[in-house]
Amino acid sequence: MSAKHAVVQLVCALMATVAMSASSTLQASEIVGDHNLDGVVDLGDYTIIIDNGLGDVSLDEWQSQFGETGDTIRLAAEGDEDDTPGPKVSVAGVVAGEQINWTATFMPDEDLYDDTTAGFGGSIAVSFSFEMPTGSLIASSVMYHLPFDTELSGFDPYTGDSIAFGTQVHPATTSVMGTGTVDAFFTTVGSDVIKPGDTLPTITFSTTLDGSIVTHGGIAAQAGMEFTIPPATSRAVPEPSTLVLAGMAVVALGVMSRRAA
């Protein structure tokens, strides 16, 4: 482990400790819903509510106060290196007939797992954007899957960072992660406590064959902290049957070449 990584892990551990202890001292914050005392009611507070089993009343309070700020605001940590603490995302697209089926899999950082009211593990929440070529998004296909189970408020970048709830689809809109006009959707969703070995939370959607390249990025929260996942690009791959047929064709050509020789 590098010295840089060790220091970052130590800082995150200290921040998580403060956040966990803050869950039982809500009155210490000047803002209702600011459970991690960072000066803003944001996704990090959601994970404290879930991990500590604070119940629907606290969740409703948090939802109603989302976006409220105080005098001090802690910025989200950058997550642009593989060894940076925080949740990660993997986005894969597979051609299936006349469309491409995409799956974004969100992976909690198990180093940030701790004892929760539901056992050893931790919840996560994400505010994420996806962009693809104009006209290619099949809007009705956008879905989230367990252990993502709660739609949340988030700052929608396609509406000037105004507060939006759940999933917002934006056809033919201006890109916020690149240039030009794109189809896009923004979604904010949270999970229950995820334990080691549990099924990972996913967001799925489909595009036409024109949507073979998707750009994605946003914020993920875990253990009372927010982490920025910078924009990245994923490309679709052919459907498995196509790959098999292509492989068989290559083998056949090889056999024919040897016979000709």
Image (cartoon, grey):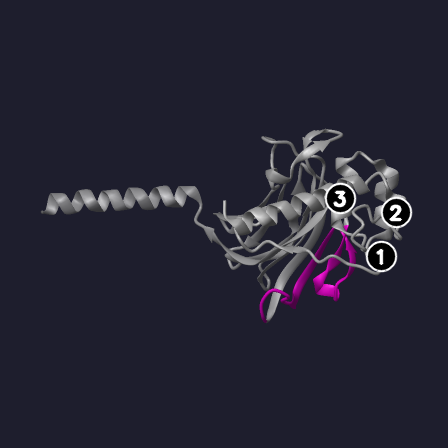
In the image, is 239 to the left or to the right of 188? left
Q: Please give the residue where the numbered disc 3 appears in the rendered image.
A: 18
Q: Please tell me which of labels 3 and 2 falls first in the chain.
A: 3
Query: How far apart in space, not on screen, are marks 1 and 3 (Cα)?
Result: 20 Å
Query: How far apart in space, not on screen, are marks 1 and 2 (Cα)?
Result: 16 Å
**x and y, in percent, of residue 185 in the image:** 66, 57
Residue closest to the eye, 1 or 51: 1
Disc 1 or disc 3, which is closer to the eye?
Answer: 3
Disc 1 or disc 2, which is closer to the eye?
Answer: 2
Q: Mark 1 falls on what kind of element?
A: loop
In the image, is 47 to the left or to the right of 8? right
Image mark for residue 90: none
Q: Mark 2 falls on what kind of element?
A: helix
Which residue range is magenta in the image?
A: 153-179
- Residue 203, placed above or below residue 67: above
Q: Please tell me which of labels 1 and 2 falls first in the chain.
A: 2
- Residue 252, placed above or below residue 53: below
Image mark for residue 28: 2
Q: Residue at x 60, y 39 (%)?
A: 111
In the image, is 61 to the left or to the right of 257? right
Residue closest to the eye, 225 or 203: 225
Q: Residue at x 72, y 50 (%)?
A: 188
Would you say residue 59 is visible in this rendering?
yes
Packing grade of label 1 (10 A; few <14, some 14-19, many >=20) is some
Which three-letter amino acid code belongs to the residue tagged 3? Val
Q: Please give the residue where the numbered disc 1 appears in the rendered image.
A: 68
Which three-letter amino acid code belongs to the residue tagged 1? Glu
